[in-house]
Amino acid sequence: MSRQIVIGGKGSVKKLAIGGGAPISIQSMWKEPLLGADISSILDKLDTLSKMGADIMRFAVPDMESATILTELSKRSSVPLVADIHFDYRLALACMEGNIAAVRINPGNIGSIENVKSVVKCAKDTGTVLRIGVNTGSLPKDILGESLPQALVSAAMYEVNIFEQLGFTDYAVSLKASNVEDTVQANMDFAAQCDAPLHLGVTEAGPPLTGAIKTSIAFYRLLSAGVGDTIRVSLSSSCEQELIAGREILRSLGKTTQGVHLVSCPRCGRNGFDVHSFVKRWEHRLFQIKKNYTIAVMGCAVNGPGEAKNADLGISGGKDFAIIFRNGKIVQNISLKNMTTSEQEKKIDEIFEHELALL
């Protein structure tokens, strides 16, 4: 088992345990530059992402202006924020002094050992956790002759030894490749050598479907072996899709039961209810619910309630009607005759929202 660290600076009320048997946390990364962004809009989005399962949110910090904006956000955010730093160690110092919860660095690309010492000293003073982030794009040239998993482990252990020699142990490590086998092997090998908490991810995993598949396979193999303490599904998609994928992976592995279990049929030629449209409208809203409900969206009014008889709440229907059911029994039959598509959707959503509030 890994040792435990707690992210959240000395003055932070938003603290999160990682490793040492703590629940596996889910991360995502902000997709847009901070420069020119509206802070209120970001805070609103962070609140939504937190409700959808984000335990940690990471932001790229390429310049001092971005560091200033992030430290302001951290004072008001509903979720701990992590600064992602490359090349300029002074950005890491600014973020830590601004009470950012954690900082992700690659010590190998922020200059001299003196720069690393400055970062570690500031981390000690502020109670900031550091993450050593190693991936295929940041490997030192002197180890490129090794196999990729070996190179990732060698690079990570080099940085770990620097931290340990400086008497600093409040760190996590990530070793990421863009394919499953190298990611799994590197993390397995590292975990056998070091008890630092591990952040898991398949870097640049790809678009939602292929990226989620690759990441699911890697996480299954690692988490089933007891390796990994916090995760990110790195998709070429929205933060919401990353969080949904991460939570469903953990649910499928029995690592969490929190939140809605959404059951929806794939749709076929018997389709009477527009499953795809309804799920698209409601998916983000449903995944903000913290209680452990099963919600079913079925395309066939004849078989739907029976196939989803264990659902706490479900919806299905036909061409001119929709039905709401609970535990396989119909509780509402909604007429949609002589309505436009938008009118039908509005009526369905209003009634479904009412029934959802009764759960």
Image (spheres, helix red, strand yellow):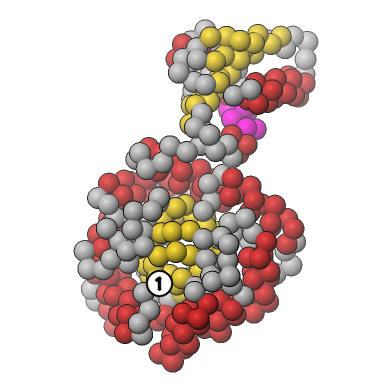
| Magenta-drawn stretch, dominant element (helix, strand or loop) | helix
Bounds of the magenta span?
Answer: 276-283
Q: Position of residue 342 (x, y in %)?
A: 76, 24
Q: Which amino acid type is shown beneath numbered disc 1?
A: Asp
Q: Is residue 258 visible?
A: yes
Q: Relative to residue 31, is residue 250 depicted above or below? A: above
Q: Position of residue 305 (x, y in %)?
A: 51, 12
Q: Is residue 280 magenta?
A: yes
Going by the image, does 311 lie left or right of 19? right
Q: Position of residue 272 (x, y in %)?
A: 59, 14
For label 1, the SS is loop
In this view, the residue in front, 282 or 23, is 23
What residue is drawn where x is 52% and y is 21%? 312
Q: Relative to residue 117, is residue 238 depicted above or below? A: above
Which residue bears the numbered disc 1? 170
What residue is drawn where x is 34% and y is 40%? 253
Q: Is residue 269 visible?
A: no
Going by the image, does 233 lie left or right of 281? left
Going by the image, does 80 lie left or right of 33? left
Give the image quarter of residue 177. bottom left
Q: Relative to residue 168, is residue 275 depicted above or below? A: above
The quadrant the C terminus occupies is top right
The quadrant the N terminus occupies is bottom left
Q: Is residue 167 magenta?
A: no
What residue is drawn where x is 57% and y is 14%? 325
Total marks drawn? Answer: 1
In this view, the residue in front, 3 or 203, is 3
Q: Position of residue 172 (x, y in %)?
A: 39, 67
Going by the image, does 171 lie left or right of 41? left
Crowding around mark 1 (Cα neighbors within 10 Å: few <14, some 14 to 19, many 20+) is many
What residue is drawn where x is 49% and y is 20%? 311
In this view, the residue in front, 270 or 100, is 100
